[in-house]
Amino acid sequence: MADVMEMKKAHKTLKQWNYKWTPIDRGYTDKILYINLNNSEVKEKNVPPQMKEKFIGGKGYGLRLLWDATKPDTKWNDPENEIVRIVDGRHVHAVACISHRQLQV
């Protein structure tokens, strides 16, 4: 137990974000939490209406976010490549490091 306490003391908070409650409509809050690991930027974004009309659920939203964040020549190991992690009801989906070329298959 002492080891755990030592580990906790060694950690420091890099960024704090306070959640503002949003009403849930049909299982969705229509919010995206964006975290930039390069500069510790944290911001909340709204889900665009076009995304809600064309994509269903966490996996669909995640693929759309990843598609918008990458370019056709983005490679899996490019620093610009994003990792998208979606919480969809009771499930957590990871849609990570995919290029446009791979998504078109």
Image (tube, helix red, strand yellow):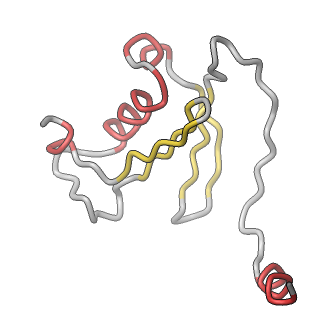
In the rendered image, the vertical position of residue 19 relative to residue 23, given as above or below: below
**Quadrant of residue 91 in the image?**
top right
- The residue depicted at 23 percent of the width and 48 percent of the height is 99
Look at 80% across and 89% down and name the residue there. Answer: 3
Q: Residue furthest front?
A: 1
Query: Toward which corner of the image does residue 25 lie, by quadrant?
Result: top right
In the figure, is residue 27 to the left or right of 18? Answer: left
Vertical position of residue 7 compared to residue 99: above or below: below
Residue 74, horizontal then vertical, whole percent: 22, 53
The answer to which quarter of the image holds residue 70 is top left
Image coordinates for residue 73, horizontal then vertical, percent:
16, 51
Q: Quadrant of the C terminus?
A: top left
Quarter of the picture containing the N terminus is bottom right
Q: Is residue 66 above or below residue 26?
A: below
Residue 65 located left or right of residue 91: left
Q: Which residue is located at x 17 percent, y 44 percent?
A: 102
* Residue plotted at (64% across, 51% down): 42
Q: Is 33 on the left-hand or right-hand side of 73? A: right
Horizontal placement of 61 versus 40: left or right?
Answer: left
Q: Residue 53 in the image: x percent, y percent?
A: 43, 10
